[in-house]
Image: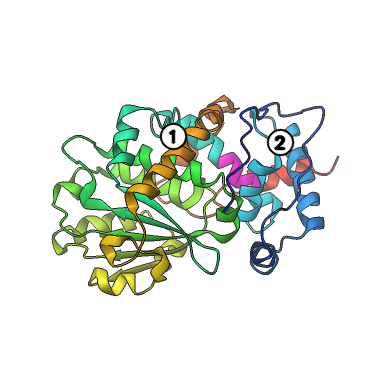
């Protein structure tokens, strides 16, 4: 898996004089997957990038936004090249970051809390399976709940997502999650309030352009089932369909290729070494991720998005999709 491009100088000018030229350089596995699952080919990709850039340039509320292909493609791939839906996803992503900056901005891997959480091994990127899907492991018991509350936990996941989206392989192949709840205690679950759950799940459901392929959980304690059920009331039906619960870790790890299992799970991977490699990736991309904060949107226009009781897919009736149609006719 090749590292993302190392440029730290992505422009946020919404009407740049020139746009970068994109070249597909991934293995054939991803080219085929992009075509079969996302409808992506060279012609559709170029047409869609052109349309999306024109929409950004004309948008009355977007003030600053990256227009490079590596950024816009994550939204086009997320919405399978429906340009209006990709534009809506981008709009919602920008509005989310501005509406809840304490959760989603200033995501710095050098922040002491973020650094400690990653070094503790709470989450580990294990690699990619034979079908090109990235695999992430969460060991919940390693989360120091006496020190880090919902905000730090949410920011950890936000930083993880932003950094993973730098890989085109993840944009196309999506990812699978292993959640190991072994030896967790009530405090791991009881500190999240309803408003915290709602903000976080809306980001996961509708605001981050991420492709969940599977979420596998094992050893979830019975005493926390009611809290999980409350959390899932904010999850989309599509996300719920991708959740698989296992009684044992042995049962869960049977769903994954042996080459992707850590040594503590009977495999060969050194999770400490994998953690060091991922921290190096975070350090290399630190300026790029922090520079996302330079993007800007008139957030007052979107306050209603997070004030509704029941959030549903494509809820902006006549909003971004309608705006796209209007802006695209002249």
User: In the image, is residue 73 part of the stretch drawn in magenta?
Assistant: no
Tell me which residue sits at (83%, 44%) in the image: 329
Quarter occupied by the C terminus: top right
Q: Which badge, 1 or 2, comes first in the chain's sequence?
A: 2
* Residue position for label 2: 56
> Residue 108, located in which quarter of the rendered image?
top left
Tell me which residue sits at (26%, 61%) in the image: 264
User: In the image, is residue 88 part of the stretch drawn in magenta?
Assistant: yes
Whole-percent x, y for residue 221 in the image: 17, 62
Residue stretch rendered in magenta on the structure? 86-92
Relative height, residue 224 to residue 120 (above, below): below
| Camera sees residue 307 | no
* Residue position for label 1: 104
> Residue 92, located in which quarter of the rendered image?
top right
Tell me which residue sits at (55%, 27%) in the image: 291
Q: Is residue 54 left or right of residue 255?
A: right
Quarter occupied by the N terminus: bottom right
Label 1: which secondary element: helix
Q: Nearer the viewer, residue 103 or 159?
A: 159
């Amino acid at each position: 898996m090749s590292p993302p491009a190392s440029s730290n100088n992505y422009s946020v000018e919404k009407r740049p004089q020139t746009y970068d030229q994109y070249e597909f350089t991934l293995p054939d596995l991803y080219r085929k997957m992009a075509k079969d699952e996302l409808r992506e080919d060279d012609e559709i990709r170029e047409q869609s990038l052109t349309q999306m850039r024109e929409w950004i340039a004309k948008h009355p509320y977007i003030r600053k936004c990256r227009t490079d292909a590596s950024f816009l493609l994550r939204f086009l791939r997320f919405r399978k090249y429906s340009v209006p839906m990709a534009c809506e996803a981008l709009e919602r992503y920008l509005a989310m970051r501005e509406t809840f900056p304490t959760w989603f901005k200033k995501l710095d891997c050098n922040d002491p809390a973020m650094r400690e959480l990653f070094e503790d091994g709470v989450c580990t990127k294990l690699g990619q399976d034979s079908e090109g899907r990235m695999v992430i492991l969460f060991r919940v018991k390693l989360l120091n709940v006496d020190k880090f509350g919902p905000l730090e936990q949410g920011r950890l996941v936000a930083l993880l997502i932003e950094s993973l989206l730098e890989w085109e392989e993840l944009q196309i192949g999506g990812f699978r999650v292993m959640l190991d709840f072994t030896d967790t205690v009530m405090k791991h679950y009881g500190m999240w309030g309803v408003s915290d759950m709602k903000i976080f799940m809306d980001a996961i459901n509708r605001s981050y352009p991420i492709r969940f392929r599977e979420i596998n959980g094992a050893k979830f304690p019975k005493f926390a089932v009611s809290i999980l059920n409350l959390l899932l009331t904010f999850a989309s039906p599509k996300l719920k369909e991708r959740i698989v619960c296992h009684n044992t870790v042995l049962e869960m790890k049977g769903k994954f290729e042996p080459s992707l299992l850590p040594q503590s799970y009977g495999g060969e991977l050194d999770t400490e070494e994998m953690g060091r490699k991922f921290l190096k990736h975070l350090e290399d991309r630190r300026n790029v991720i922090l520079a996302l904060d330079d993007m800007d949107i008139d957030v007052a226009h979107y306050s209603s998005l997070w004030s509704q009781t029941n959030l549903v897919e494509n809820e902006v009736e006549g909003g971004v999709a309608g705006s796209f149609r209007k802006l695209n006719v002249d």
